[in-house]
Image (cartoon, grey):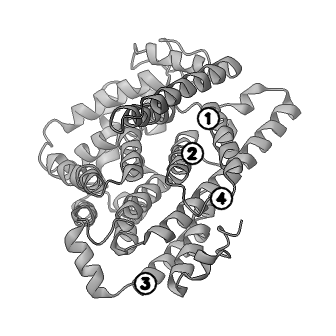
Amino acid sequence: MKALLLLDFTGKVFSKREKILYWLLSAFFVSLFLPEMPVVNNTLIIAIVLDCCFFNSWAEKAQLLRRRKEILFMILFYLLQVISAVLSVNKDEAMVMLVRRLPLLVFPLCIGLLYIREELKDRILLSYCFFTTVASVVCMLYAYYQFRQYNDPGYLFSDNLTRAIGRESVYIGMVVNLALFTYVYLLIKQSFAIEYKGLVFLSIAFLLVFHYMLASHIAIITLYTGFLVFAAWSGIKKKQYLKGSILVVLLLVAGFLLMRFFPRTLESFEELSHTHYSYSNPGAARDASPSSDQWNGTNIRLAVWKCGWQLVQGHWLTGVPLGDKQDKLVEVYKQKQFNYAVESRRNVHNTYLDVLINMGVIGLAVFLLGYIIFPLAGCYKARDGLGIFIIFSFAVAMAPETWLDRSVGCIMLGFFFSLVSGWRGLDHP
């Protein structure tokens, strides 16, 4: 606990600016789990921006901006969004989207232009893991209370599990993914920020169960793929064959136990086989017993992807203006008599396709350079394994969801990508 409160020796020698940044970011992590409180979120973001303005010199910020190419392309991406908004017919919608996506500009300009040294980085990561674990425990306790009150096991599954904080399981699944990767990173590194390893292992065990019960397919696939890649890397690259084999066995055992005691999550994967759909189907997506004659998570995505791809035709180069994008998509839905999507104004459930529709191949290229290619290249050169896992997780998670259409999605994208850049050393581009 001393490490979290900066009361140990290393914490006490942090500069005043580092301590202020640490506490502001810790408060920001708490805000990620608060039910819709935009005033709190915006106040904290403004405080972080102001602190970052004076954290380091403007000369150093300029130097970092020249070296961190991904930050340049993140800024360019948002500026292209501004141009797209100006060209929109539906100005009101364009302004709403611009404000919602403002974190994609704010965080790169503040956190992306800092240098967060190793000791402070570990404390920030530990704080993130701690508050993620606490929020997960609160969600589990509330869900269990609901389960006991109504005798309905559905309260212990998927979005119902995060009802206490009003967040969708797909986003909390990503948050837990990052916490699990970070816990493992801090343990392997033998960071001084870790005071009680037993509590960390207990937290990991709990988060694995909680994560599985969230039933976010993409989060589960990403997590276990990441761990398997790490196990293979440990065994082959470092020639630690026994360690790699043990990790694989532990993953298999953990997976078996989770499937054995929580079969409903495994059953939810059955919807991946139900890919047939009819646009005229009036049925709503359901969580249980999916079939091809109703809308489920798989066929609804296949249907809207096809509509989105149709909208791309004729707008390859520069796309459809930001404020008109959703209206044009709804027009395609109407052409196909896709009434369920018309009524719910479905987005395309794919961040990459959404960017392609809105900004064409030019905008998509800028987005990929700023959020995938340059960040991965920078992490590879810096031998930043945790950064690679974070970027990989987001890259995969953006395939089945439109993160840019949600406030929490924009906040998480802007913050974590900027943080990964922020802790890269001054000697790494």
Q: Which residue is pictured at 45% across the width and 68% down the height? A: 118
Circle 3 or circle 1, nearest the eye? 3
Residue type, mark 3 in image:
Phe
Residues under numbered marks 4 and 1 in contact, where contact means CB atoms less than 8 Å apart: no
Q: CA distance from mark 3 to mark 4?
A: 27 Å
Dot 2 or dot 3: first in sequence order is 3
Residue type, mark 1 in image:
Leu
Left or right side of 143 for 279: left
Q: Which residue is pictured at 79% across the width and 43% down the height? A: 141
Dot 2: within a 10 Å radius of its alpha carbon, few (fewer than 14), some, or many (20 or more) residues?
Answer: many
Residue type, mark 4 in image:
Leu
Residue 61 is situated, as x and y percent measured from the top left of the image, at 29, 80
Label 3 sits on a secondary structure element that is loop
Residues under numbered marks 2 and 1 in contact, where contact means CB atoms less than 8 Å apart: yes
Residue 273 is situated, as x and y percent measured from the top left of the image, at 44, 13
Dot 3 or dot 1: first in sequence order is 3
